[in-house]
Image (spheres, grey):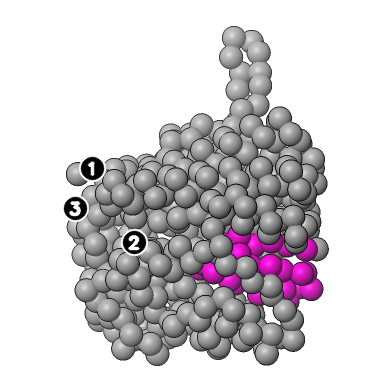
Amino acid sequence: MKILVLGGDGYLGWPTCMHLSAQGHEVMSVDNYLRRNLSREENSDPLFEVPNLHRRAELWKAKSGKEIQIRVGDLCDWDFLAETVKGFKPDALIHYAEQPSAPYSMKDRHTATLTFQNNMMATFNVIQAVHEFVPDCHIVKLGTMGEYGTPNIDIEEGWLDVEHNGRTQKFLFPRAAGSLYHTTKVLDTDLIWFYVRTWGLRCTDLMQGPVYGMETYENTGDESLYPFFNYDELWGTVINRFMVQAVAGYPLTVYGKGGQTRGYLNIKDTLQCLRLSLENPADKGELRIFNQFVETFSVNELADKVKASGERLGLKVEIKSLPNPRKEMEEHYYNPAHTGLLELGLKPHYLTDDAVDEMMKIIIRYKDRIQKDCIFRDVKWNK
């Protein structure tokens, strides 16, 4: 297939480009370096040095013999996006291109405005471009399990059958996002669902949990092809953050009671899920939703796993409970369904002791690059 990866410079975007290219697809990566630039503005350098997209494509070609096309530009610029879609004519489009940090979205009015304007306009323009130039293109949008919040009922896979006064209908599962970033993802889903009903688009919405890891089948042992691996409060996912804190001798920052439970997955499984969604596309006029995670953990369970790994590797690891800066339930019921991708053939990688140890060993090799003063930012949800 011809696949357009929007947000192809990001933590997930670049590994996705390589993975799909390795599978024989024709890939174009598009990005405006927003995540990269915001990270620099906030003094949040990744653990590994990250070449620009053109250089990454050169390195990938030297390694694999395969080309990834590169375009640098802003999806909020209609002319740029229209020219890109019209020229490439993708069979499928992966939409990663949003400001991805919940803490950044809650930092202040400026960061909230940027998040809202960028995320909503990018999604709106993508929908319009597909409808106008490639109406049969399969849109695969990265959503988030954070859209659901933590309801006191089982979380179904995107949809809920409701019986009321003797009548029944299927609705989108109620959303209760916990940050402005997550709220923009809810609005994404609503926007796409409207245009699926109105224009008959085909779309898969992937409600993804937090991702961990840095090595994929395409970049193993090759730092130049590693993704953006951030470890600070703004940009680092919790497992990645805890592992770096453990290696740096920085206490693991558990917010509040630490009972916050979410669904997690290895970066290799993210790539599997994307590929399976593309190879088994949604029907025309269908909004298909998958809950994209492998296993659930509380923050306390993750901290204990990282602490135990550190001790196996000769590190002294401390866990420290901090007042929770976020507005969230610290103890709650959490039982989300996630069968759709397993039925398509997902073969999960689990967070075993060996898996944690292997990731920790990689981080230990780059210990000298860790900037301790960048880890904790104390971004408060309710100032």
Q: Indicate the amino acid at tag 3.
A: Pro
**Residue under circle 1?**
382
Query: Would residue 240 be visible to someone looking at this image?
Result: no
Picture coordinates of residue 19, whole percent (x, y): 67, 72
**Marks 1/2: CA–CA distance:** 16 Å
Ranked by sequence position, the earlier of labels 3 and 2 is 2
Residue at x-position 45% and y-position 56%:
100
Picture coordinates of residue 54, whole percent (x, y): 59, 79
User: Which part of the image, by quadrant, shows the N terminus?
Assistant: bottom right
Residue at x-position 75% and y-position 61%:
88
Which numbered disc covers residue 323? 3
Picture coordinates of residue 98, whole percent (x, y): 50, 54
Q: Which residues make up the magenta segment?
A: 2-30
Mark 1 closeness class: few <14, some 14–19, many ≥20 residues within 10 Å:
few
Furthest residue to the front? 79
Is residue 186 shown above or below 260?
above
SS of the residue under disc 2: loop
Q: Indicate the amino acid at tag 2.
A: Leu
SS of the residue under disc 3: loop
Q: Any magenta on residue 28?
A: yes
Q: Indicate the amino acid at tag 1.
A: Asn
Ranked by sequence position, the earlier of labels 1 and 3 is 3
Q: How many marks?
A: 3
**Marks 1/3: CA–CA distance:** 13 Å
Residue at x-position 62% and y-position 86%:
59
Task: Give the camera-side residue of 300 and 280.
Answer: 280
Q: Nearer the viewer, mark 3 or mark 2?
A: 2
SS of the residue under disc 1: loop
Query: Would residue 46 be visible to someone looking at this image?
Result: yes
Mark 2 closeness class: few <14, some 14–19, many ≥20 residues within 10 Å:
many
Picture coordinates of residue 237, whole percent (x, y): 41, 63
**Residue under circle 2?**
234
